[in-house]
Amino acid sequence: MRELFDQAARDYDRVESLMAFGSGPRYRRDALVRAGLASGMRVLDVAIGTGLVAREALRVVGPGGAVVGIDVSAGMLGRAAASLPVRLVQARSEQLAFDRTTFDFVSLGYALRHLDQPAAFAEMLRVLRPGGIACVLEISAPTTSILRRALGLYIGRVGPLAARLIGSKKATRDLWRYFWYTIEHAVPPATVLENLSAAGFHGVRRRVTYGVFSEYTAVKPGVPAGA
Ligand SMILES: C[S@@+](CC[C@H](N)C(=O)[O-])C[C@H]1O[C@@H](n2cnc3c(N)ncnc32)[C@H](O)[C@@H]1O
């Protein structure tokens, strides 16, 4: 999987933008703000990829805040480094090399289905300060079979076609087929909510847009220092 992301990194943003009709940045920013991201916060963006979530987080936190990104893929991190003023670390979400209570906000965009949820959620909780917020964005397979089939066709067939049209490498086409496979076989949203609660988060909730875009938010229990 890491090799696939490494090889597809170059064209990731172009295909994502085509497939989302350019709505990705706005949606990501709005979702972060809905979850509670605000000016001046210290953010960890887990599975930063090329930086599509981190770029919007930077806009929201402004010059008084900071964003750090981690990812397993050197190819993805290379793309993020080329365009974003953020500290980047090559690491797995299941093992974050940061001290306890380092961050006010942890985001995880469209990577939930690639990782070990209990381990990643435990690490996200550990690095958040008390009262800190976790925000997990993911695409969920619709529950009705007709919509599920339509989404499968769009991501698993149109995605590779869009990649071919812009002259992407085979890896990018394979990545979009792999995306649909992982969405279709992902654990159900109810299990994600249970996993967040089991990790120790409070106030766990899910907001859904168009029956497909899931925004999970959760809060680390406790009172922030100095409150
Ligand atoms: C679909 S991309 C999403 C990137 C970005 N967050 C976005 O919103 O576009 C998924 C990313 O998750 C990363 N990834 C997958 N498994 C991971 C893990 N266990 N730890 C850290 N990163 C991981 C991949 O390398 C890839 O960059």
Image (cartoon, rainbow, N blue to C red):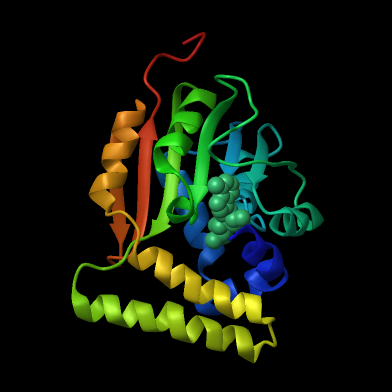
In the rendered view of the protein, which quadrant contains the N terminus?
Answer: bottom right
The part of the image, by quadrant, that contains residue 88 is: top right
Residue at (47% x, 15% y) in the render: 224
The percent coordinates of residue 42 (x first, y second) are: 61, 31
Residue at (65% x, 41% y) in the render: 91
Q: Is residue 118 toward the left or the right of residue 46 in the image?
A: left
Q: Is residue 198 above or below residue 87?
A: above
Which of the two residues, 25 or 142, is positioned nearer the viewer here? 142
Q: Is residue 142 toward the left or the right of residue 51 in the image?
A: left
Quadrant containing ligand 1: bottom right
The percent coordinates of residue 178 (x first, y second) are: 49, 70
Residue at (41% x, 56% y) in the render: 138
The percent coordinates of residue 60 (x first, y second) are: 59, 44
Which of the two residues, 51 or 189, is positioned nearer the viewer here? 189
Which residue in the rendered view is the most extreme toward the top?
226
Which residue in the rendered view is the most extreme toward the left?
144
The part of the image, by quadrant, that contains residue 103 is: top right
Residue at (66% x, 33% y) in the render: 65
Tell me, yes or no, if residue 20 can be seen here. no
Q: Is residue 143 toward the left or the right of residue 54 in the image?
A: left
